[in-house]
Amino acid sequence: MLIYGHRFIQSDSFYHIPNIDAIQNTPSNSIIYLDFSEDNLEIINHAVSNDVVLALGVSNITEIVYASSLGAAFIVVSKELAKTAQNIANNYLFDAKILVHISDESELEELIILGVDGVVFSNAIIKINS
């Protein structure tokens, strides 16, 4: 299981950006985080075409498939969507890893049992302003 942002485990951070220019304000080889939306398609396409590692936050089943098709390396889902998202990723052999956004380590055990690829704690997501 991948674990991002836990106090015991050193891990990469995710940089939540508002626009393409903000990518320049992140460390090289960063993981860029965006919520999936049609408004963010230009940023998503720019990131993927420039080999920037991309994590997309999604809120439904259709967006899970879009995120994979757009080339996201990580698809971040809610705990409620975790089992379905992981089943879809396994069934369609996604290259992307399914991560569940959590705020407390007490949520880990359930997600381990569900077999999700990983988790990302809130403190692993750093908001970058342009």
Image (cartoon, grey):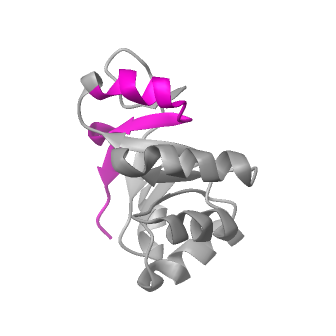
Q: Nearer the viewer, residue 9 or 24?
A: 9
In the rendered view, would you say 4 is above or below 85?
above
Residue 116: image location, x then y, percent: 53, 35
Q: Is residue 40 above or below residue 91?
A: below
Q: Judge by depth and name the residue closer to the eye, 123 or 21.
A: 123
Q: Residue furthest top?
A: 8
Q: Position of residue 113 (x, y in %)?
A: 47, 24
Q: Is residue 106 above or below residue 12?
A: above
**Does residue 108 belong to the magenta stretch?**
yes
| 105 relative to 26, above or below | above
- Quadrant in which the C terminus appears: bottom left
Give yes or no for residue 18 being in the magenta stretch: no
Q: Which residues are magenta?
A: 107-130
> Residue visible at 50% across and 34% down?
118
Please provide percent x and percent y for residue 21: 45, 74
Q: Front-most of 86 and 125?
A: 86
Q: Residue at x 53, y 81 (%)?
A: 41
The residue positioned 68% from the left and 68% from the top of the image is 69
